[in-house]
Image (spheres, rainbow, N blue to C red):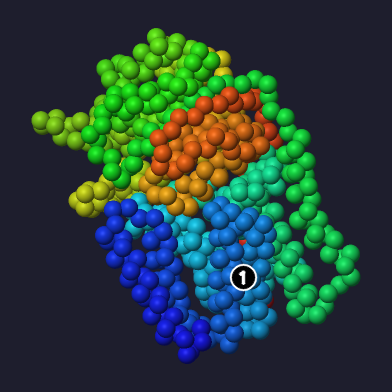
Amino acid sequence: MPKKIKPYLLGGLGIIALYCGYSMYHAPLWRYQTLFLFLSIWLFVLGVFENKFTKLLRYKQYISYSLISGLLLWLGFPAPGQSYLLLFAFVPLLVVERDISLHHGGVKKREVFKFTLTTMVTWNIMCTYWIANSSLIAGIAAILINSLLMTLPFLLGHVLRHRMPKLQYAPLVCLWLSFEYLHFNWDLAWPWLTLGNGFASMHSLVQWYDMLGALGGSFWIWCCNIAIFRFWNDYEKRTLKKWWSYIPNVLIIIIPILVSLFQYYSFKESDVSLDVVCMQPNIEPHYEDGTKGNIQILEECMEMASAVLDTNTNYILFPEATFGRVDAGYLEKNDIVNAFRMISGMEFPDVAILAGVSGHKQLDASHADLSTTRMSVIQGDSIYYHIFNGAYHIHKQKEDLYYKSKLVIGAEYMPFSKQLGFLDSWVSGMGGTMKGFAKQEAKVTLSNGTYNVAPIICYEQDFGGFLRRHIKNGAQWMAIITKDGWWGDTGGHKQHLEFARLRAIEYRRSIARAANTGTSCFINPRGDISDATSYGEKAVIKQQISLNSKMTNYARMGDMVGRLAAFLSALFIMNAFVASRMKKER
């Protein structure tokens, strides 16, 4: 940062941060204020401490390159959605890592860590700032923790590249893919920024996700980055080779795109179809005060749907948690459940209903020790129960209640609750709880008697490998019910919508998406969106969607790319460890 203008730039950033903080304090709902607040604070910190950040002579250039990588990664993700930028987004950061290694004595873990963290914090802020719109502390924690976690595979890849120079960047790629695979499967699961998700906005270029999934996309993106980096490396050193020596690099980029375009334009949908209605009641979660009862909400929805409901309708979808305070232990006495029975059994006898519900279920004392069991004392008696976020399904006389299985950290479950159980009394004293929501344990695929549907509640849609259990259990289409209003009209709900395209491609299943505040839509097995509603409007949409019973390669093999990368990463680390011990013994 030039010394003459540095005070003015820092002063401007400080003013922006103060204005955003003031605006957030007085505004009932936030939109992009959190983005500008976090970004101005982050750039202010980098500006103030740039001289103390590192002792490297070219630190200003390195900081700039690191910020450019973070900016390109953001631009490549949905909203803005310039996915092609991901193919070289890591090149500036790779240049920084190379220069530090070449000019400053090989392995420099501390320096590589600093500049990599700069990239990751920038990327996380610009892509996931909206988390703070529902909880400021949770948003800050998510950005900082995820940035640190994403820095680790790059740092370890830097170390292994010098321990095993013949393998070049293979350890880095495997470690990154292993990290993404872990991020699907552990207690701190947060797969939002999986690199392969970035191509949701240009889904026609990644139709081969039906073979390799989003992790296959991450692998391709890394291969393209390394291919372009090698060309740039030769260009900088004035050691460009004959043009044909770069043909393999070009093919790495071009062949997957050509294969995908062929798949996209040659794909044919099944002739078997289903008539689905999606409700968008537009209940704003920040202002929801419970004054509207379940029956009133249902009546308003059915009044909107009256124009599109007919004898051909097979399904009605209501968004996540549209109906609350449902006692799962006494469904037969619940007013909203009885209303559903009237609709499905008498008014529209051939219609099945899938509705987002939330509530509780009372348990007996034998369940007292379960991690999700809560206790309340009422009139001297201990009452045990759990709470849930679920989907109620009814067709004719058959009823099912499905519990959401992939829960949101903090809001719906506490990570590592078993290991941190000793904190339970302290957390309870602070007014919180270590008890999470109950989850669906058994595999469930719902049916209207003829066709099977995979119920997917909100965050579950972002776990491609997890959804295999529905497909392998016979699901022929997917119903996504979600409640995206917590984040406001920001990039969050737009990204969430775009990611759903990839699930349609991975399993070649049509998707009907019912969102509370937006966006509701239909997605065909190629990932094309149709009949999309606007954010913040009351709406009802209807469409015939195609059904598919065929299994894709991804449905058969799951996240094979992640498992293979984890295996190779373990081998690389073990090899480096053994080689290091042998070197010391000599």
Q: Is residue 355 above or below residue 585?
A: above
Please give left or right for residue 180 compared with residue 256 in the image.
left
Q: Is residue 467 above or below residue 42?
A: above
Q: Quadrant of the C terminus?
A: bottom right
Using the rendered view, name the quadrant where residue 585 is placed: bottom right
Query: Which residue corresponds to mark 1?
Result: 93
Q: In the image, what residue occupies the spot 66% across and 37% down?
A: 526
- The residue furthest left is 379
Please give left or right for residue 311 compared with residue 379 in the image.
right
Q: In the image, what residue occupies the spot 64% across and 71% down?
A: 92
Whether residue 281 is visible to the viewer of this picture, yes or no, is yes
Q: In the image, what residue occupies the spot 33% across and 17% down?
A: 339
Q: In the image, what residue occupies the spot 50% across and 66% down?
A: 122
- At mark 1, the secondary structure is helix
- The residue furthest bottom is 4
Instruction: Tell me the amino acid under the disc marked 1.
Output: Leu
